[in-house]
């Protein structure tokens, strides 16, 4: 067991540092480590865990928690989660401190000015990729449009929109 | 800690933990940063658009999952170290328990067509959250040729050519910061 937990930590610690943007960027690396290198599970089991991580609310990177659970139970889940979240969380905590301590410094303004167009491009491209991958044809696109419009002009609770989106899909399928 | 005084009604750590727990347990379909935007900038106005977008730019460029990085950013801004801990714990821990439970009933859930349909519909609606935030992020990019060109280049590199994010950030980031430095000088 300790060897297994150590192996889990050694898989996810390095991956933690190459996670850029959302956790989706390292999914293929996780797949390679977990299925091919360590053979902790079959490709089909991995696909299931990935599907669960997409289905569940919360951060998509909880895929790692699930893998830990599958491989070594509760302790596996704990070790894998700590390995993927802690190092970069500490790094970013340091950055947040630095940013508060030197608030308004010139270097900070320059870095922000440099990174903001990149971040805007990243967010929009992520949305674009999601739109392209969207199942469900025009009803799905209509929901995206309606939800965006509602969010921009009203103070509606997002949870209500998400519930409406889900309900629309279920009802439409029953009618068609 | 000057900036803490600027927040009129400063939230408690418990309040922050509960807000992030709620988002962590209800954000079906993803788009968590968009949820944070809605909650902290648009609804509660605890953070300004600029404060949030600066954190988002750093979250995107530095290693680490965006969601946890943003939770740390928001928590630290509002309540220092305790706030960062409360937010990151709130977004990760309850959702981690829930996902294990979902995994246990997964095989029963996926048998029903309605599960897939509901999740697809939820995911479509959740895109609106990211898109709203993306529009504001784009609108708040300085109206100058260089930043706008960099934003478009990033979009094309990732969205159209599917280049790995890490290379876009490692190459585009320093170039963009360099240009910002000389533009400002």
Image: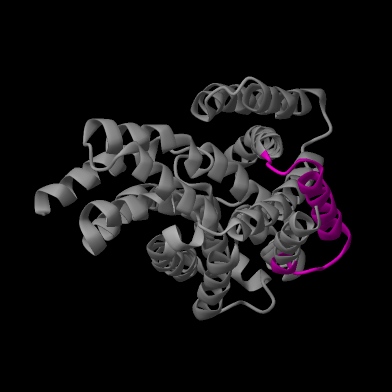
Query: In the rendered view, does B59 fall on the left or right side of B148?
Result: left
Question: Magenta: predominant secondary structure element?
Answer: helix
Residue sticking out furthest to the right? A153
Q: Quadrant of residue B115?
A: bottom right
Q: Position of residue B31 (x, y in %)?
A: 63, 52
Q: Residue at x 53, y 76 (%)?
A: B18
Residue in the picture at 57% in, 28% down: B173
Residue B62 spot, x, y in % from top left? 49, 39
> Which quadrant, please, contains the C terminus of chain B?
top right
In the rendered image, the vertical position of residue B76 relative to residue B180, given as above or below: below
Provide the residue span drawn in magenta: A134-160
- The front one of B150 and A95 is B150
Total number of numbered discs in the rendering: 0
Decide if residue A120 is in sight here. Answer: yes
Dividing the image into 4 quarters, which one contains the N terminus of chain B?
Answer: bottom right
Residue B36 placement, left or right of B59: right
Query: Residue A36 lies in magenta, yes or no?
Result: no
Front residue (pair A22, B74): A22
Q: Is residue A118 left or right of residue A5?
A: right
Q: Which residue is located at x 48 percent, y 48 percent? A: A51
- Residue B2 visible (yes or no): no
Is A152 within the magenta? yes
Residue B80 x, y percent position in the rendering = 49, 66
Instruction: Left or right? Give the position of B81 relative to A15.
Output: right
């Amino acid at each position: 067991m300790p060897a297994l937990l150590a192996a889990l930590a050694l898989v996810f610690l390095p991956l933690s540092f190459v996670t850029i943007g959302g956790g989706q960027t390292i999914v293929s690396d996780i797949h390679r480590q977990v299925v091919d290198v360590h053979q902790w599970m079959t490709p089909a089991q991995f696909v299931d865990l990935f599907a669960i991580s997409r289905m569940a609310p919360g951060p998509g990177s909880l895929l790692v928690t699930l893998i830990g659970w599958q491989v070594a139970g509760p302790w596996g889940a704990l070790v894998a989660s700590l390995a993927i979240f802690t190092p970069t969380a500490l790094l970013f905590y340091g950055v947040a401190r630095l940013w508060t301590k030197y608030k308004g410094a010139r270097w900070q303004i320059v870095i922000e000015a440099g990174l903001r167009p990149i971040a805007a491009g990243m967010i929009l491209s992520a949305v674009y990729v999601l739109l392209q991958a969207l199942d469900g044809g025009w009803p799905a696109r209509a929901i995206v449009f309606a939800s965006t419009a509602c969010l921009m002009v009203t103070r509606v609770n997002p949870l209500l929109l998400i519930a409406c989106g889900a309900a629309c899909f279920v009802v439409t399928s029953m009618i068609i | 800690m000057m900036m803490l005084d600027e927040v009129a009604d400063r939230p408690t750590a418990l309040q922050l933990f509960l807000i992030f727990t709620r988002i962590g347990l209800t954000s079906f379909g993803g788009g968590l940063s968009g949820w944070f935007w809605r909650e902290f900038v648009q609804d509660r106005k605890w953070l300004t658009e600029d404060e949030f977008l600066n954190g988002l730019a750093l979250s995107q460029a530095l290693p680490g999952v965006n969601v946890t990085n943003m939770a740390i950013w928001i928590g630290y801004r509002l309540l220092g170290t305790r706030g960062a801990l409360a937010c990151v714990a709130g977004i990760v821990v309850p959702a981690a328990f829930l996902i294990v439970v979902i995994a246990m009933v997964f095989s029963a859930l996926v048998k029903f067509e309605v599960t897939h349909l509901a999740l697809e519909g939820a995911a479509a609606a959740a895109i609106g959250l990211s898109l709203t935030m993306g529009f504001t992020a784009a609108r708040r990019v300085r109206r100058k040729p260089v930043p706008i060109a960099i934003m478009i280049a990033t979009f094309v590199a990732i969205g159209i050519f599917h280049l790995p994010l890490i290379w876009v950030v490692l190459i585009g980031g320093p170039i963009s910061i360099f240009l910002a430095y000389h533009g400002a000088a």
